[in-house]
Amino acid sequence: MAPGHTRDDGTASLAAAEGQPHWLALYGPGHVPCVAGPFTAQRSMEQVRVVVDRGAELRGRIGPPELLARLGTTAEIDALVPLLDAGGRSWVDARTTKLIVERVASEQDPRNWQPNIDLPLAKDGSFEHGGLPAGTYDVALAGVLPHGFDDGQQLTVPLGRVRLIDGETKQLDRDLQGLIPGRLRGRVLINGEPYSNGNVQVNRATFEWHGGLANSPQARLDMDLDGEGRFQADLIPDTYRLWLPYRTRGTSNVGYWKTRDTATVVAGQDVEFTFRVRRVTARIRILTAQGTPAPWLHVTMQTKGQPRGWTSWTTDRDGWITIVPAPLGPFRLVVTRPAQSQGAKATGTKKETWLDELRVPDKGNVAQFEQRLPEERR
């Protein structure tokens, strides 16, 4: 209610309502943050004296400067900061390179959980922060390798665990030379032909979705290919694969078809790699148990791997559906409920029915299958 700053002698003057209880929230820096009180303000009250704990100091340097210079926000985003509201500035802050200092869970008080402490880095990679409560902390470097306006590769690097002692200074220096970005010069061939003017997403090879949760950080880099199917991207050293959308971004649910090939990016080096992708079109005809076409059925697919996402088809009047691209591994079709099409309505129950497992041949770009519904789905 009445903010203020201490003077050189440690004193501060704050306005207060007479006769009312007040608390002092002392944030630092230079000591452990704390709350003191309550104090009842009086016209002739004596000076309130609060003794704080000095705490510990963490200082050090993260390098090399070449890496830190590549991380952070883009010039376009920085120019917008003065125009942003609090939420927008918070989003920009999340893209700023910093150290994250987190108290280990075993030392946390569940009733008063300590939030992460973000420490800014100077241009030379140095940092210092006093007034940290004594204890054990995990320290990590967080930043973003930007790609354009709203794109980039998230980076979180654990730097180790430190034990801080009240009244002492802990030095933490790290050389992250091996994380200097390398450049991937890629080309995409589909069935031997350039994926001309296509769109791909570059992701770490280990990245997967599990019920909406990611198992590793995403590169979050969308690339538009040229007429020869080429692209280039600066990336943190790691192994990458491409995700190719098989359903356009204009729909509410984008699906991706992932390459089997992976490319390894090396720190500070250019790497050339050709992603050779096999794309198979599967034509599948669904028949009744008596061998007649089963039109207007609603069909989904269950498969491990690619393509991922929720996709459905409706059999035409002759019982056909077309899957592009078809999975290169085993997959099964699931007939769920009848679908409406051209005023016709499928007969039979609405019970989910799993058909036999399918797999495209090892060679060829077109595969054709025939599957029959079990007797109860006549």
Image (cartoon, rainbow, N blue to C red):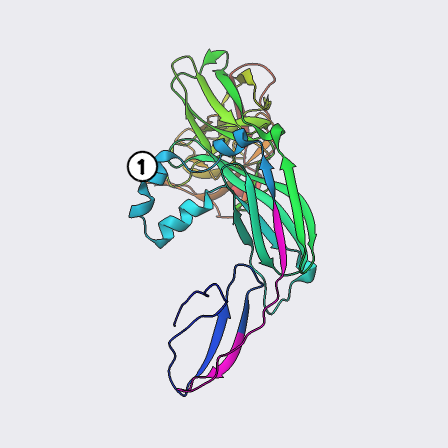
- Residue 1 location, quadrant: bottom left
Q: Is residue 42 magenta?
A: yes
Q: Residue at x 65, y 63 (%)?
A: 108
Q: Which residues are magenta?
A: 36-59
Q: Residue at x 56, y 17 (%)?
A: 271
Task: From the top left corner, tell me how far across and down residue 258 is, in percent.
Answer: 53, 28
Q: Nearer the viewer, residue 43 or 206?
A: 43
Q: Look at mark 1 in the image and give the residue it sits on.
A: 342
Q: Nearer the viewer, residue 290 or 26?
A: 26
Q: Is residue 81 above or below residue 27?
A: above
Task: From the top left corner, tell me how far across and down residue 343 is, in percent.
Answer: 31, 40
- Residue 253 location, quadrant: top left
Task: From the top left corner, tell me how far across and down residue 264 is, in percent.
Answer: 60, 23
Q: Residue furthest left?
A: 83
Any part of residue 319 in sight: no
Q: Residue furthest front?
A: 9
Kindly report the secondary structure that dominates the magenta region of the rendered protein. loop
Q: Residue at x 51, y 16 (%)?
A: 365
Tag 1: amino acid: Gln
Q: Nearer the viewer, residue 328 or 225?
A: 225
Q: Is residue 324 left or right of residue 58?
A: left
Q: Nearer the viewer, residue 368 or 142?
A: 142
Q: Is residue 319 above or below residue 216?
A: above
How many discs mark residues in the rendered view? 1
Q: Is residue 323 above or below residue 278?
A: below
